[in-house]
Amino acid sequence: MKNMKKRRTIAAAAAGLIVALLSAGCPASDRNAASADRIHDRAIVWDCHNDLAYRVLYEGLDIGNRLPGGHVDLPRLKEGRVDVQVVALYVQNYLYPDRAAKQCSQLLEAMRGMIEKNGAEVELARTGSDIERIISAGKIAMPLAIEGGHAIEDSLEWLRRFHGLGVSSMTLTHNISHGWADAAADEARWGGLNDLGREVVKEMNRIGMVVDLSHVSDETFFDVIEITSNPVIFSHSGCRAIHLHRRNVSDEMLRALAENGGVIGIIFEVGFISEKYERSRRELRAIAAPFFRRVPEIEDLDLRITIEHLSQGQDWPLEGLPTIEDVLDHIDHAVKVAGIDHVGLGADMYPRTPSPVGIRGVQDYPNITRGLLNRGYSPQDVEKIMGGNFLRVWKRVAG
């Protein structure tokens, strides 16, 4: 797999030949940059979490164009030589239990239509084999993921229906403890999974759907680890040893994840990777909170969702932002605890929130490759982190 040609065009082949011919006469820094570019091109570059679906459904934007602001679209993905972009179908928590499946269906339909519209450059990927085939054809593979198990409205039939329509993974919770699993950001209802939750995990194993444990409570995580027959993932989480955030993962959980054969996608979300920045964000939110509480609640749920989406980023400080080095610190720690075979990338960059300095969007993913090489990772280990580990899980679980 690592020898697969990612961009089978005459232009790409010619560019690689030119770099190889000229690098011998270049300064060491230029040769190092050329070497990093070759490693990045050889790797399967995989981002395991992004909220692009919201822009497609609620803003009506075409991902084939370079979008105004934001972090991801097809031009930026091509610029960053990203091969696999998992797109989350995030379902608003307050739509549970009656409207969650409807919103998930709307997001799914919008993304399927947009992928089809741009079919010359991107293709829906369901399995690991799909991903390999799509990349070999010179396209970007785009798996779809449900973010928040409340989307299935406590129904295994909805789970199977979404999977049949192309969803290949599901985050078991978002920020609410719902009808069968507890979330990290909410009070416990079940002490982890209840009986229905255990059935959901077993059914995901049976149908070949990847179980995603970002956002779940610690108890839910360990319940899943006990019953799952497949590797699991954290699609977008950080390391609790670096920043004691409820959404981040403890060392005990990292070790259990490694024993399971799973992968953690290290998040770029600035509040999760830096305790100092998160403290500043809490202070800014506290100032604004009294005023937002005076705003009447919007009764039209579709309008409310749209307004909340468009207003994201209004209470995020623009000073003291974490940097790419903070992201690399989380990668280093996860590798130290879980091992090189169990770490990947899951950015969770949102169109109106800031990103770490050094990563404007997916176009800057080559900076991650360079940063890993500068920290002493071998080319083979870089390829695992950049996407090889997630590909292994998708092939094992989804085929």
Image (cartoon, grey):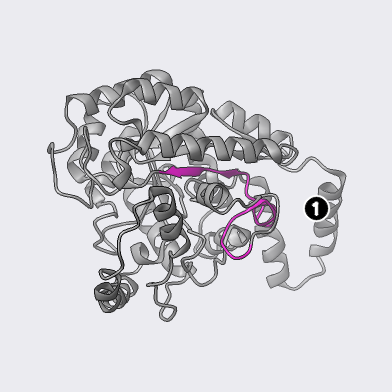
Residue 398 image offset from top left, x and y in percent? 48, 25
Left/right placement of residue 96 relative to residue 223 reads right
Q: Is residue 87 magenta?
A: yes
| Residue at the image point whose x is 54% and y is 37% from the top | 143
| Mark 1 closeness class: few <14, some 14–19, many ≥20 residues within 10 Å | some
Residue 355 image offset from top left, x and y in percent? 48, 67
- Please, what is the three-letter code of the amino acid marked with disc 1? Gly
Query: In this orientation, does residue 19 appear?
Result: yes
Residue 202 image offset from top left, x and y in percent? 30, 22
Q: Is residue 158 magenta?
A: no
Query: In this orientation, does residue 397 appear?
Result: no
| Residue at the image point whose x is 19% and y is 50% from the top | 186
| Residue at the image point whose x is 55% and y is 60% from the top | 368
Residue 336 image offset from top left, x and y in percent? 35, 53
What range is drawn magenta here? Answer: 68-90
Secondary structure at badge 1 equals: helix
Q: Which residue is mark 1?
A: 16
